Image (cartoon, rainbow, N blue to C red):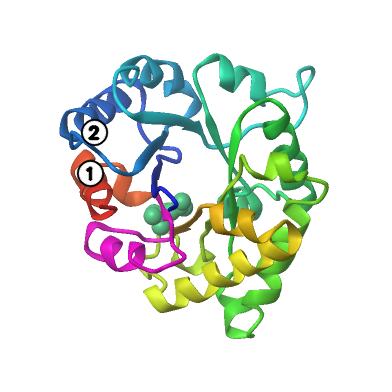
Amino acid sequence: MRRKIIAGNWKMNKNLSESINLISGIKNGLPQNVSAEVIVCPPFTSLETVHSLIEEVPVHLGAQNMYFENSGAFTGEISADMLKSVGCEFVILGHSERRHIFGETDEIVNKKIKQAVSNGLKPIFCVGETLEERENGKEFDVIENQITSGLAEISGDDFNKIVIAYEPVWAIGTGKTASPGQAQEIHKFIRELISKLYSQIQAENVRILYGGSVKPNNAADLLSQPDIDGALVGGACLQAESFLQIIEAAG
Ligand code: PGA
């Protein structure tokens, strides 16, 4: 049985006081025996404070990005060690906004994944096709390429630390969700690919999240698909109430 993950990607939202408000709301409304693994990914400037506020609750901390070098003259970048030092367990890597707005290639994403796992961080490794790619029937090729390149030279042991997130670019922040069937088809494909790249057992164990306009009113349908093991939530995680409703939809 794969435990479901509900992860909130706050993106470039919430200053420090707004972050305190949001995490307090999540904390206060968290069901007692929450069954999902809950992860929040605030901006860098709020990580330490949010960490101090979740110490006694079953909420885990993630960052939204990091650089692949250990330290040095990389103005504006953040290292894996820095993230660990403020309590991060997870880091989102290869998000489509990083790929498309900031020009991250598969090769960069691969270097970041290697750096994260070798420093004890668990990557939430994002993949997804654009609308044009889907319209040209290329979604499976694109996903296969992103997964194979992103995981190049990642050992089986290190792979066990990775969570995969399928986020069709055309569904992110657009209000257009992939139908549960469309999402399930890709998740199943990813799981089969993992069994070829690693092993059947690792394919059965890896958690594959869906992301792209997940809301309280569509979460349960998506999460009931056999190969959807959770959600990476953007817009709907910026308010405690809607994030909590999605956590509840996970069971
Ligand atoms: P969205 O974002 O829920 O606002 O579509 C999801 C994501 O980008 O992780």
Give the image location of residue 236, x and y in percent.
Answer: 30, 50
Q: Kindly identify the residue that appears in the image at 56 percent across and 58 percent down.
A: 204
Residue 31 visible within the image: yes
On the rendered structure, is 28 left or right of 159? left
Residue 179: in sight, yes or no? no
Residue at 59 percent across and 36 percent down: it is: 122
- State the image coordinates of residue 148 (x, y, percent, origin top left): 75, 60
Q: Which residues are magenta?
A: 212-233
Marks 1/2 in contact by CB < 8 Å: the verdict is yes
Secondary element type, mark 1: helix
Label for residue 216? none
**Residue 214 belongs to magenta span:** yes
* Above or below, comparing residue 34 to residue 199 in the picture: above
Q: Secondary structure at mark 2?
A: helix
Residue pointed to by mark 1? 244
In front of the other: 197 or 13: 197
* Residue 26 disc label: 2
**Spatial separation of the CA atoms under disc 1 and disc 2:** 7 Å
Label 1 vs 2, first from the N-terminus: 2
Residue 49 lies in what quarter of the image? top left
With respect to residue 248, does 78 lie above or below?
above
The kind of residue on which mark 1 rests is: Leu
Give, as a three-letter code, the residue at label 2.
Answer: Ile
Q: Residues within 10 Å of mark 2 (few under 14, many from 20)?
A: many
- Kindly give the residue lying farthest to the bottom in the view shown: 136
